[in-house]
Image (cartoon, rainbow, N blue to C red):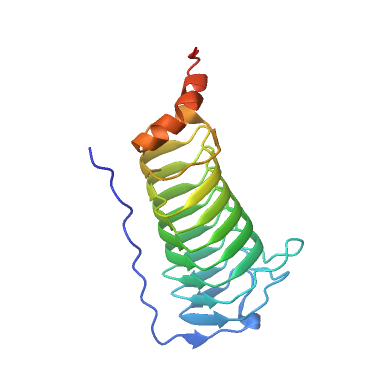
Amino acid sequence: MTTEAPRAPKIKLTSLTPGYLGDIGQEEFLEGMKFTELDLAEVDSTQATYLDCSLSRVNFGPAESPVNLTGARFSGSKIEDCRADTWTMPRGSLIHTEISGTRIGAGVCHDNVWEKVIFSNCRISYFNLRGTKLTDVEFRDCVIDEIDLDRAQVSRVSFPGSSIGVLQCEGSRLGNVDLRGLQPYKISGVHSLAGATIDEMQMMLFAELFASELGIRVE
């Protein structure tokens, strides 16, 4: 059986209107706007919608006072060369969205919905995606220290050219998840890896871990 690859997002950004800090607020509907070189520290953007928008070289704020994106929705948008010491977006969504060249310290994105999303050339220290539904998501050429997919629903997700240090997937449901090439030094929730694809080298590397999870003694 062939593992299905993620389906690519469809993004068409044309004739964007310059966006300013004052445009961003609670429950704002932002369409066809381009935000460049803004500092969003302490900005409240809860329940806001970003439709067909571009965010470039934007600082999402320091760890102690990040922009609040709780419940925010990004659709048909691009986020490029940005920085987020803490990316706070619980219960939000990314639909047909591309994020590239971005540095994320701690991504607090639990209980999200992601569909047709690409992360490329991103550096991520920790991603909390607990309870998130990910469909057609690709992490391309990314470095991720730890990703938490506990209780997540994950379908058609791949990690080409990427590295992950710690992979957590306790109670997750996987389907067409391509883990080939990854060599995490720690996996939590091996019993939840049903539906994932690994390669022969990974099988040898993870043999001891798999045996331990299954209660098999190797002597």
Where is residue 93 shown, x and y percent of the image?
50, 58
Where is residue 49 shown, x and y percent of the image?
52, 68
Given residues 46 and 87, the one toward you in this image is 87
**What residue is drawn where x is 39% and y is 31%?**
194
Which image quarter: residue 84?
bottom right
Given residues 199 and 87, the one toward you in this image is 199
Left or right of 99 on screen, residue 68: right
Which image quarter: residue 42?
bottom right
In the displayed structure, 91 sits above or below 59; it is above
Which image quarter: residue 174?
top left
**What residue is drawn where x is 52% and y is 20%?**
212
**What residue is drawn where x is 33% and y is 53%?**
6
In the displayed structure, 202 sits above or below 127; it is above
In the displayed structure, 173 sits above or below 44; it is above
Left or right of 96 on screen, residue 3: left
Tally of marks: 0
Furthest-left residue in view? 1
Position of the N terminus, as image quadrant, is top left
Given residues 2 and 40, the one toward you in this image is 2
Furthest-front residue in view? 219
Where is residue 103 shown, x and y percent of the image?
59, 64
Where is residue 101 shown, x and y percent of the image?
52, 68
